[in-house]
Image: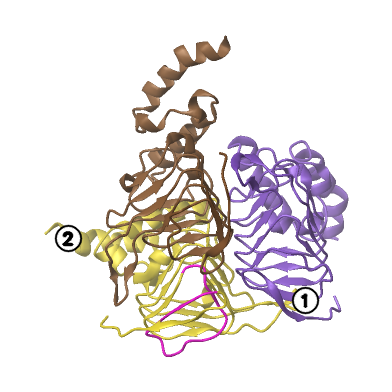
Chain colours: A purple, B yellow, C brown
């Protein structure tokens, strides 16, 4: 009963109000409809993004210790908004680089997703970005970095501290190491 | 003389007062009795943990850029409270995982201590945690990660950027690499 | 015209005023003269360094999630002040360790520059520091660590997640891995 009142009455009101500050398409899904933790992120981010102006260019709630070069280039499901609430991650996609994060993917702290390198011979310029695509139900371990153009198929697990330099498009695998190598293949029932 | 007055008079008062907000057993030792830097941490954390509600579930002073899944599972000496004041560390011990940190152990920034993995085939679930035990006088270098079940004996040194996948129970050694391997054994006079 | 007014009138005023709080030699160069983003950093740091007392010992604007043991030991060009505005970096140069950063060098988030190790047999003491020297136009990738005594020549690129244990004094190269190895040599026209 309480939940119905919340969903019918308070949720649309909150969404309408906070939709003045963040894009509405991010203010839905499990963190707003099955739980209310999303509003906690919204409230904190109202202060940090709109008043303190940290990550002010990001149209969804994001913590102060995550850096995003080009928010419009990132595609993700609002159910995975948790990936933007911790610390140490850098979505390095300047020059309109694209990052696609499959639904149900978990990204740990201190992870780098780098679509765009500096030009080797002149760091003031950047190379053309190469899209990073992460499939559904992946898990990117702490302190890992994915380099430009990496494609990970669904159900990929990237071990902590890995540097992923090439694609593993088939997914259903565990990769780890620097550079990341196939550790084992898995079969998902997710 | 000043120190005696502090220890006899001010210290018990401060401990009684701030013991309303943090567990008293953490408000002692060298950072409170030989120095006063501990109170600086307490004061900052009163604001961040009790008012801003960041890491509000942790009963000792901890910085805003350290994540702890299950504070009650972590055992450490209050003389090592410094390990919780910097940034980037993640004590990933959900599902009641245990982490034991030996006295005199130093943990650098951006370190992960992971007792509990996501289930390989369903990330919404977690596997059973496996305890991480770090002996006395160890040093965990920057950007390292320890995986579930790792036991490090006393006087272990983990080189920066290491991923420790197995135990080195004898201690008195330097380990490094991804995965971490024995680099050399040492003899401690600590 | 507006730029001339800024440079002739407002810039000296701002520099004189904020020079009361930070050393003037850091309040110049491209972030203050060709752009005004430097003042944003100054303004934020006035709050975090001077009021909140985080990194209060650092005489230039630095973010709250970068740690610097001994600011006087670090030499850099004010045009590279951007390297101190993100997160996760640790300039571990206690005991008066020296770090020299060549002009035009980019340091990514979560990077460690470690000049001074704990003593192997007694972590309460530190070994003698060994200077880290990074040449001009280098790029230190995310999550990398440079160990004591490392010298990198000009135009060096350190791949993400590398642990640099020895010097590459000739520069003009890409190094990567744990430990870092030569990947390729490059020829710069920068």
Determine which residue is flagged by label 1.
Answer: A173
Q: Say if residue C157 shows up in the picture.
A: no
* Quarter of the image with the C terminus of chain C in it: top right
View extreme (bottom): residue? B170
Q: Main secondary structure of the magenta part?
A: loop
Taking the spot 57% from the left edge, 47% from the top edge, the residue there is: C187
- For the residues labelled 2 and 1, the Cα–Cα distance comes to 60 Å
Is residue B98 depicted above or below C43 in this figure?
below
Query: Closest to the observer: A58 or A98?
Result: A98
Q: Residues within 10 Å of mark 1 (few under 14, many from 20)?
A: many
Numbered-mark total: 2
Q: Chain of mark 1?
A: A
Q: Chain of mark 2?
A: B
Extent of the magenta region: B160-177
For marks 2 and 1, give the one nearer the viewer.
1
Query: Closest to the observer: A34 or B85?
Result: B85
Q: Position of residue C99 (x, y in %)?
A: 37, 50
Taking the spot 69% from the left edge, 58% from the top edge, the residue there is: A147
Callout 2–callout 1 Cβ contact below 8 Å: no
Q: Say if residue B3 shows up in the picture.
A: yes
- Looking at the rendering, which quadrant does residue A79 occupy? bottom right
Left or right: A190 in relation to A89: right
Q: Position of residue C55 (x, y in %)?
A: 39, 46
- Looking at the rendering, which quadrant does residue C120 occupy? bottom left
Left or right: A96 in relation to B106: right
Q: Position of residue A156 (x, y in %)?
A: 77, 71
Left or right: B151 in relation to C59: right
Q: Is residue B161 magenta?
A: yes
- The local secondary structure at tag 1 comes to strand
Determine which residue is flagged by label 2.
Answer: B3
């Amino acid at each position: 009963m309480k939940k119905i009142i919340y969903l019918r009455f308070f949720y649309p009101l909150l969404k309408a109000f906070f939709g003045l500050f963040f894009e509405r398409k991010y203010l839905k899904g499990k963190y707003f409809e099955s739980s209310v933790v999303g509003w906690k992120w919204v409230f904190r981010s109202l202060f940090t993004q709109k008043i303190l102006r940290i990550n002010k260019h990001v149209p969804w709630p994001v913590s102060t210790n995550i850096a995003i070069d080009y928010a419009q280039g990132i595609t993700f499901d609002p159910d995975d908004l948790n990936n933007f609430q911790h610390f140490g991650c850098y979505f390095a996609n300047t020059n309109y680089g694209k990052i696609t994060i499959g639904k149900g993917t978990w990204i740990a702290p201190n992870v780098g997703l780098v679509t765009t390198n500096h030009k080797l011979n002149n760091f003031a310029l950047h190379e053309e970005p190469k899209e990073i695509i992460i499939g559904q139900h992946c898990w990117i371990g702490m302190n890992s970095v994915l380099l430009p153009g990496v494609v990970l198929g669904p159900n990929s697990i990237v071990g902590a501290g890995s540097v992923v330099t090439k694609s593993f498009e088939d997914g259903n695998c565990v990769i780890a190491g620097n550079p990341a190598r196939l550790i084992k293949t898995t079969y998902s029932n997710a």
